[in-house]
Amino acid sequence: MSRLLHRTPAEELPEMVIVSDGHGQERYQAAGEPDYFGRGALFTGVSSKARGAVTPPQLVAFNRELIGFLNSQGIPAAESPRYVGRSDDISAMQYTPNVVMIGSAGTSSHFHRTPTARCQDQVNLTKALVVYALLAQDEAWRKQYL
């Protein structure tokens, strides 16, 4: 992402970036805690315990509203307070403060074991991303949240 944004003319840089990555479940499974498989799209406001991106408060508030809407439409989504590692959010922060992180539960994203994910979580993540992208095109939405 960094190379792409670096080569983008300043007037064409995005006002907001959605970063989508796996929300690792290994540490929770190893500790005997419930995992987040089956919860659909997972939203978080910080990566790497705030050493990475921190989603601005107005977008966190919107994400919470969106989670409620998605669930009311039969699209599972949840806010995840759990640790999420840094990803492309670091690169995106160099160009906009408006970084949103949405992913789904998974394991072994670095292939030290066979990666796992639930297909239905991926489907629901995709639905959430489509809804977000459509809403973010609205000028009134942009004025309120960006």
Image (cartoon, grey):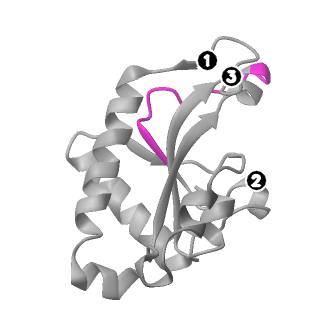
Viewer-nearest residue: 24 or 110: 110
Number of the label disc, if any, that sits on residue 48:
2
The residue range painted magenta reads 30-42
Q: Single out the residue that lies furthest toward the top.
A: 114
Number of the label disc, if any, that sits on residue 115:
1
Q: Amino acid at mark 1?
A: Pro
Height in image: 85 above or below 68?
A: above
Label 3, label 2: how far apart the Cα atoms are: 17 Å
* Marked residue nearer the N-terminal end (3 or 1): 3
Label 1, label 2: how far apart the Cα atoms are: 21 Å
Q: Residue at x 45, y 71 (%)?
A: 16
Residue 72 lies in the magenta-colored region: no
Residue 46, image x and y in percent?
66, 60
Is any part of residue 76 visible from this angle? Answer: no
Q: Residue at x 65, y 68 (%)?
A: 54
Overall secondary structure of the magenta section: loop
Describe the element under mark 1 as helix, strand or loop.
loop
Residue 40 lies in the magenta-colored region: yes
Height in image: 124 above or below 128?
A: above
Number of the label disc, if any, that sits on residue 85:
none
Pointers 3 and 1 in contact (CB under 8 A)?
yes
Front label number (1 vs 2): 1
Residue of label 3: 108
Q: Residue at x 58, y 27 (%)?
A: 106
* Marked residue nearer the N-terminal end (3 or 2): 2
Viewer-nearest residue: 14 or 85: 14
